[in-house]
Amino acid sequence: MQRSILSKSNVNQHEFVSSRIPKAIWKDAEIVSMSATAGNETSFGPARTVRKGMLRTVSQLYKESLIRLMSVLQNTNPNFVRCIIPNHEKKAGRIDVPLVLDQLKCNGVLEGIRICRQGFPSRVPFQEFRQRYEILTPDLISKGYMDGRKATELMVQRLEMDAELYRIGQSKIFFKAGVLAQLEEDRDLRLTAIMINFQALCRCYLAKKAVQQRIQDIQAIRIIQRNCVAYLKLRNWPWWRLFTKVRPLLSVTRQEEILAAKEAELRT
């Protein structure tokens, strides 16, 4: 009687606990028990006893899952998205400035920006810095091989940058906030000037080619005009008229001579 009552009470307690605790925890517990059972099996058969250290509690499972999560975050580059409510009226195109600023302050965005501006948030590898901004220091670095750190130091000295705005590390150069944007703007201006000069040279070359072609056309027209004038003068010359009348007869006589030579060859 007592055993039946105890068994029923145990079943009721188990049902009560199961209804109060999420099923995911019981699922993890089943997996743990299965792994513990598998770990206790040896080549000589299943072990008779189970060690207490093999049983893991819910806190241990939570700790292990947290460690796995942190390892995943360390091996990846997570991006955090912060949602900002523009207004409480839920209307498009309307921004409540005090509300937005208050959210940015509470989320720590403004504080994070301030901290980043005090440090050196921008970082560029030496090789990339040389390839991208060497246009700002022409004829400074030879075309041969040069160490990236040394080339970066020479470029920074030529640019006359304040020493407080950058730091040179082992493989990268670090800049204060806004310095890299200024370098990009200077680079764009330099590229614009180069493209303008290139376009001017192209237009100059095309204009010279057009002028040379025009000069050649004028010279050809003058030669044709000079030949036409000479022909008109020659056409009224008496000897030319005589030559034009005698020329057909000369061709007939030449053909007769050729025929006579052919006949002589056939006879021989």
Image (cartoon, rainbow, N blue to C red):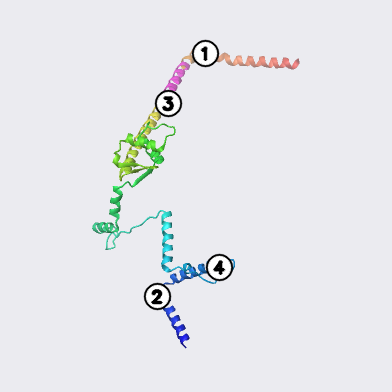
- Determine the residue located farthest toward the left in the rendered image: 98
Classify the position of the C terminus by image quarter: top right
**Compared with residue 217, is residue 50 higher up or lower down, i.e. above or below?**
below
Q: Which residue is mark 4?
A: 41
The x and y percentages for residue 97 are: 24, 56
Disc 3 to disc 4, C-alpha distance: 96 Å
- The amino acid marked with disc number 4 is Glu
Residue 73 is drawn in which quadrant? bottom left
Disc 4 to disc 2, C-alpha distance: 33 Å
Disc 3 to disc 2, C-alpha distance: 96 Å
What residue range appears in magenta?
215-231
Disc 4 to disc 1, C-alpha distance: 127 Å
- Determine the residue located farthest toward the top in the rendered image: 239
- The amino acid marked with disc number 1 is Trp
Q: Which residue is mark 2?
A: 20
Q: Main secondary structure of the magenta part?
A: helix
Q: Earlier in the sequence, mark 4 or mark 2?
A: 2
